[in-house]
Image (tube, grey):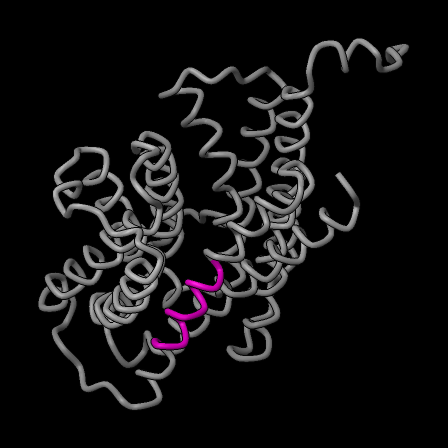
Amino acid sequence: MPRSRNTQGAIFMSMAMAGFSSSDALSKSVIGHMNAGEIIFIRGVFTSILVYLIARHLGALRSWRIVLKPVIILRIVCEVIAAITYITALGLMPIANASAILQSLPLVVTFGAALFFREPVGWRRWSAILVGLVGVLIIIRPGPEGFTPAALLCVASVLVTAGRDLATRSIDPEIPSLMVTVITAMSVAFFGALLMPALGGWQPVSLTSLLHLLLASVLVLIGYQSVILAMRTGEIAFVAPFRYTSLIFSALLGVFFFAEVPDFWTLCGAAVVIASGLYTFYREAKRRVPPMAQESEPRSPV
């Protein structure tokens, strides 16, 4: 594949991570004025409207009965829990720390794929997963009292997000992705409304907060579209590692907008997580090389 195609894919992936990180920052900016349920509800309504209009324009809408499929229900539940836990965690910890923990997601998905789909995972990738989890512990740094609530919420978000991704793999390929997104966005908004009373009830929303959440919804959609373009433009093994640029964007947003400077151990833990993730991507790419191609490579003297 021409290098320019890979470069374009890397740019698209970096754009996606910038979009997601900026959306998180916008959500974090309003967490002091409203509860997580209200944020999820308002952002979910905006996202639902935008995605529905796009899906309708592209003819991607299907029968609403697919929402009754167990795998769709599982995906919705995971998405709702992931949104609640991550947004709540953002209000309790620096955005760079939350983003750094989130970088362990590919490792957790690899673990889940081996556990539930029996995908082959060699000892090298198992080792990378364990090292990545050590990196997460370095970021969290549990004290004598144990894990902080923010850290537990962020870890929970990673686990249920991995569950969402694994559930997505089991959805019938005949169901358009946009239809799944429409159903998920509407469901997230609905559950956000249900959770509002338990989380403090409805709070008056300023025009600034409303605009922040509207922009956050738009940025999420840009992020999703950019990921699709990235994966369809460049080689996956080349493009996928650029997911880790989200940590750079999150750190910069934290410094400039929230005066949050990542400490030494957070940076060390993030480096460990990213290194283990990159190694996992490398091993996955090597595993997919045809046997004949592997035999033609010079053998290592070791």
Quadrant of the rendering where the C terminus is positioned: top right
Nearer to us in this view, 195 or 71: 71
Q: Is residue 281 left or right of residue 191?
A: right
The residue drawn where x is 55% and y is 22% is: 126
The residue drawn where x is 38% and y is 65% is: 92
The residue drawn where x is 59% and y is 23% is: 125
Q: Position of residue 180 (x, y in %)?
A: 28, 47
Q: Position of residue 279 (x, y in %)?
A: 67, 32
Quadrant of the rendering where the N terminus is positioned: top right
Image quadrant assignment for residue 165: top left
User: In this picture, is 62 found above or below 219?
Assistant: above
Q: Position of residue 127 (x, y in %)?
A: 59, 23
Nearer to us in this view, 169 or 42: 169
User: In this picture, is 277 found above or below 183?
Assistant: above
User: In this picture, is 238 found above or below 39?
Assistant: above
Q: Position of residue 299 (x, y in %)?
A: 86, 11
The residue drawn where x is 21% and y is 45% is: 77
| Main SS category, magenta section | helix
- Give the number of callouts: 0
**Magenta part of the chain:** 213-223
User: In this picture, is 299 found above or below 59?
Assistant: above
Asked if residue 214 lies in the magenta stretch, the reply is yes
